Image (cartoon, helix red, strand yellow):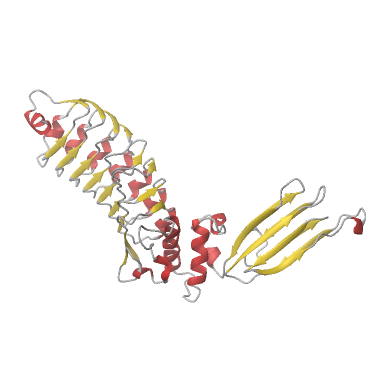
Amino acid sequence: PVYGDVSFYSTWEVYCGGVEYLYSPSLGYEEFGSVEVFGIHTIFVEPRVSCKVVAETKFYFDEISISVYHNSSEITPIVAHYYTWEMEPIEFEFPVLSGCMLDELSTVSDVNDVLDYNSIQGQAAAWVDVEASDLSLCGTEFLLQLYALATINFSFDGTTKENGLSWLSSTNACKWSGIFCDHTGSVSVIFLVNEGLTGRIPGEISLLTDLEIINFAINDINGTIPSELGNLSKLTDFTCSNPHHQTLSGSLPTELGNLISLKTLDLTDNALTGTLPMQLGNLSRLTSLTFQGNDLSGPIPTAVGNLQNLELLFFDDNDLTGTLPTELGKLGKLGNLKLDQNKLTGFVPREVTSIGSLEKFSIEGNNLTCYEDDLLCLSLVG
């Protein structure tokens, strides 16, 4: 229901699905003398349409109070606006979602975003509500799966370098380009490499709880890494490298340390800043960790020594400072270590150069020094 509380010469109009549901004309001050008169109106709207409210105050001390409720609940409005005579005429839109849609989606996204047609969440919710209306998705994990993928679609502007993602052509997400599902129909892989994608990674991607691989390499994805990504406990590969473009920004969320299944973490050539979080040391299954070509600063955390399955470690071309932690010597499977073009100082620990599997080791562009009798260090660097 939509409630309008209108005084004096104020007017408000409600249009839903292009149909005028209500027009409240000015009540007229002269007609009622000095008695203040309020017009209180209630309308009920069928689901799966867009509603627009246009309101205007026309007289000194006029005021309008409009509230929109979902499923006849009058406890907390999902949309509420209050206007006085001092304000400009206003206009706002909101979707009318059906059944459980708003109730379920508002538990995983901000309700204000879900009801905002200009947000990716609002666009995704409206699409799911219309396109999946006959699938009986309420109360199932597939509602959230479809919603999550729709937010990704709208967040990436729905475009690629050629014909678009073409994701919203059907409700069978397992047939969408770059999407792969397991035998139960749950999305396990998103592989969108060199697709010309722009936009941000939405936090709703964490609703795809069976994801094992995310690869967004060679696109123009910008913004920050959502902390919600840390909820993907099955994720084994997260790649968002972007040679020569540098689009991801902000710091590395500490929640990345929750990705206990992760084996590959590749964020090469972005514009990430801040320090390396100690929580990276929780990723004991990592075999490849590449952060080269960013603007990361601060020391290399000693917790990196916990990553004893690591074979590839690229921290080159950043602004890392401090000395090399001796704990790097615990990386018994490490074959390639790149630390060049940073601001590291001090001696290279013998524990590092004594790693038996180490074949490539680059430290140029720092102020690091090999011990004179550490021939292995000298040979690796030279």
Image location of residue 43, percent across then percent down? 71, 68
Along the line of sight, which residue is nearer the eye, 325 or 1?
1
Along the line of sight, which residue is nearer the eye, 124 or 253?
124
Residue shown at 43% from the left, 66% from the top: 146
Q: In this view, does 366 lie above or below 169?
A: above
Judge from the rendering whether residue 293 lies leftward or rightward of residue 76; answer left or right.
left
Q: Which residue lies furthest to the front in this view?
A: 162
User: In this view of the protein, can residue 258 be seen by the observer?
Assistant: yes
Image location of residue 185, percent across then percent down? 35, 70
Residue shown at 40% from the left, 59% from the top: 159
Along the line of sight, which residue is nearer the eye, 20 or 99?
20
Q: In this view, does 180 lie above or below 118?
A: below
How many marks on residues? 0
Residue shown at 35% from the left, 40% from the top: 271
Which quarter of the figure has residue 11? bottom right
Q: Residue furthest top?
A: 372
Along the line of sight, which residue is nearer the eye, 123 or 274?
123
Which quarter of the figure has residue 334? top left
Viewport quadrant of the C terminus: top left
User: In this view of the protein, can residue 69 be seen by the observer?
Assistant: no
Which quarter of the figure has residue 324? top left
Image location of residue 272, percent across then percent down? 35, 40
